[in-house]
Amino acid sequence: MNDSDISQNLLSSFSVQRDNFLSRSHESYEERKAHLTNLKKLLTNNREELLIAISKDYGNRSYHESLFAEIIAVTDDINSSIKHLKKWMKVQSRETDQMLYFGAKNRVIPQPLGVVGLIIPWNFPINLSFSGLSSVFAAGNCAMVKMSENSIHLTRLLMKLVPKYFKPEKLQFFEETGTVGIEFSKIPFDHLMFTGSGATGRKVMAAAAQNLTPVTLELGGKSPAIIDPEYPLLKAVERIMFVKQFNAGQICTTVDYVFVHQSQTIEFIEIVKKWIKQHVPDINSKDFTSIIDDRAFQRLSDLIDDAESKGATIINLCEQEKQVETRKFPVTLVLDTTEDMIICNRETFGPILMVKSYSEPEEVIDYINSKDRPLALYPFTKNKALLELYIERIMSGGVTVNDALFHVAQHDLPFGGVGGSGMGHYHGYEGFITFSKLRPVFYQANITSMKYLMPPYGNFANKVFNLLAKLKS
């Protein structure tokens, strides 16, 4: 299928959904709840098939990690949307200036936008597509979802399953065949959500701009952890390393690098070694996830080679070396880095943790603020003043205090980046708002004072306007 055929196929699907949206009244609470319930049924009724497909796409994906991140977290998100939906949909009363507009009323009506496009990456393909759909459907929209070329088994399964739960005018999934993403970005959606790299995000935003399509960009970046020397080091290590090895580090909100006080660097390394020996004893285990493809595996290898050639200290924490055939990459620490190394300037997106030492909090603040704003910040401290300093001085998409990653799983918290790590939010009420138009409506009273303030203006108008100016000043 050439680019023209791909474009025509996508536009045809878009037209079906747009015509359906425009030809009916906005969905009721009952209809939206039914769609959310069907989303959940699709996941729960086909759970094992979905998990097997994801693992095939990876080569090996930890069953338990997939179950937790792709099924449990998402069904919990959908349940939360259903629980709060009626409240979210309520028309809001807003204040009206009764001195100027006596008897009038102001209302804000949340209304669906229409057809929403979602471009989904491979690392958490169910989570990122269905949590997005949870917000999209709660707001009453239709959706088209473009999956990654690295999620081919899952995509084909979803394309087979979705018609059993949704009509094509409500929801369709699309397979990436090489240029689908480019053509998908050009569709005049009412909103477009993209999750992926910053480089691709810029291209998506540029394409969407041709149609003035608003975008939500979830990008990523290098999210740091900071360990206060007064915080229990063992507890910090076990929490950081659990997140670092989860999905083999292929998470946009993983700990990309960690600041360890210079007095604790050696102790930190020893505790990390013990933790990995206990919890990741064999990277060939099914519990340890493969790197997604050969290109990503080579990228990680090149990153380590680059750092080592420029003087970094490399510590392989596992008993095995990297496994090329199965794309298993050992959990690795990188120390003594310099700014000319690739690892200091690009998101790692793998089981590699850069360790930086520091002596004073200001060093940490200055370093992080010299880079793009990260998607997440992970301060480990019991010192409230220090915590407030980090939160106030370092801007990031979100924050988890004394742990990592788990702010993403809180369904009543908005999720999203800032600056280089993205724009816009979804999850919870903020997701509902993102995919809704908060439509302001002014209801004029039967009798309005404006009747007496129309031109030609005379002494009465002068007196009234001067009085109003005085009262409002």
Image (cartoon, rainbow, N blue to C red):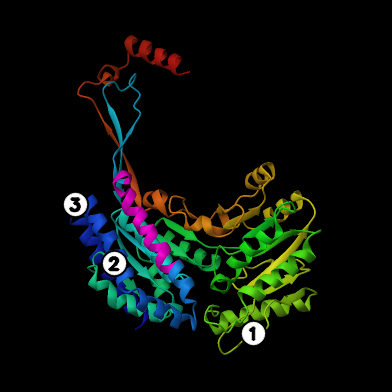
Task: Report the residue marked by disc 1.
Answer: 322
Residue at x-position 56% and y-position 54%: 419
Rendering coords of residue 133 (x, y %): 35, 61
Q: Nearer the N terminus, badge 1 or badge 3?
A: 3
Q: Is residue 341 above or below residue 363?
A: below
Residue at x-position 55% and y-position 53%: 398
Task: Report the residue marked by disc 2.
Answer: 41
- Amino acid type shown at disc 1: Lys
Rendering coords of residue 126 (x, y %): 40, 69
**Type of secondary structure dominating the magenta stretch:** helix
Q: Could you tell me which secondary element the residue under label 2 belongs to? A: helix
Q: Residues within 10 Å of mark 3 (few under 14, many from 20)?
A: few
Q: Could you tell me which secondary element the residue under label 1 belongs to? A: loop
Task: Report the residue marked by disc 3.
Answer: 25
Residue in the foreground of this view, choosing between 170 and 201: 170
Q: Nearer the N terminus, badge 3 or badge 2?
A: 3
